[in-house]
Amino acid sequence: MDVVGNFKEIRKTIPAYVTLVAVSKFHPSESILQLYKETGHLIYGESRAQEFASKFSLLPSDLKWHFIGHLQTNKVKMVIPGVSMIQSVDSYKLLKEINRHSLSLQKVTEVLLQFHIATEESKFGFSLQEAMDMLHDRDFEDMSNVKVRGVMGMATFTSDTRIVGREFKTLRSFFEDIKREYYTKEQSFNEVSMGMSDDYLLAIQEGSTMVRIGSSIFGSR
């Protein structure tokens, strides 16, 4: 598997304003190190707390790690020390736990709110109303150790681009609604993370600012 070659070809297809998260979950540290050394790419995505903690301890300290998988509250303490962003905040309870552990380390953790936009019930995420209720809550206003940077979502696993495109439009509209209601004056609320190996070009067309690409770079595992 030509990891470096794959990365360079994909990077050519992504506009400069779109952040590429190289999803390294289930792939060895050696592949990440190779990509880092040969291209200088810094942003990697992991989905399991224990695997992330292991890689974080082994790999260069200037890598920026994004946690993109479902995160259980009892695993938050494993990822907070090294994570740059948690993209998969799918409940108020989880956000409170992230804030608590971030406070204990005197750091501010950047997060994205994950929305359930797909037809599969197995996927996690807020509804728009749940997110609005949380953002309106007084306890949320007191959380000083998390910074909400935007939204994230995963489309239905289907070859029907009409369905996928519609779901991406929905996520983008959620972002706009929240921006207008709560973050009008905050330029840092600016991320829409959507799009993976099979649908990232469509996601970019629909307003993605961040794509998460794994198998097209590292191969399947």
Image (cartoon, grey):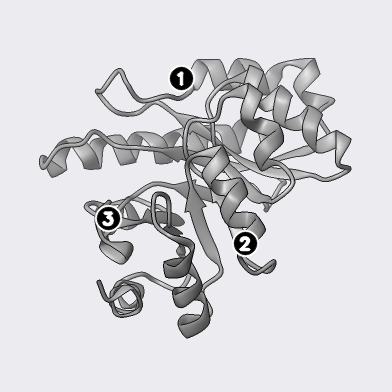
Image coords of residue 53 (percent x, y): 62, 47
| Mark positioned earlier in the residue sequence (2 or 1) | 2
What residue is disc 1 on? 127
Mark 1 Cα-neighbour bin, 10 Å: few <14, some 14–19, many ≥20: some
Residue at image location 47% in from the left, 40% down from the top: 152
Give the residue type that dot 1 points to. Ser
In three-dimensional space, the C-alpha distance between marks 2 and 1, rounded to whole angstroms, equals 37 Å
In the image, is residue 18 above or below residue 72? below
Give the residue type that dot 2 points to. Leu
Residue at image location 34% in from the left, 56% down from the top: 214
Q: Is residue 122 visible?
A: yes
| Mark positioned earlier in the residue sequence (1 or 3) | 1
Q: Secondary structure at mark 2?
A: helix
Residue at image location 63% in from the left, 23% down from the top: 73
What residue is disc 3 on? 197
What residue is disc 2 on? 58
Which is more toward the observer, 67 or 19? 67
In three-dimensional space, the C-alpha distance between marks 1 and 3, rounded to whole angstroms, equals 25 Å
Give the residue type that dot 3 points to. Ser
Image coords of residue 14 (percent x, y): 35, 69
Image coords of residue 119 (percent x, y): 24, 23
- Say which quadrant the N terminus sits in: bottom left
Q: Is residue 182 left or right of residue 90?
A: right
Q: Is residue 37 left or right of residue 145?
A: left
As drawn, the residue found furthest toward the left would be 160
Q: Secondary structure at mark 1?
A: loop
Q: Quadrant of residue 163?
A: top left
Looking at the rendered image, the disc whose residue lies closer to the viewer, 1 or 3, is: 3
In three-dimensional space, the C-alpha distance between marks 2 and 3, rounded to whole angstroms, equals 26 Å
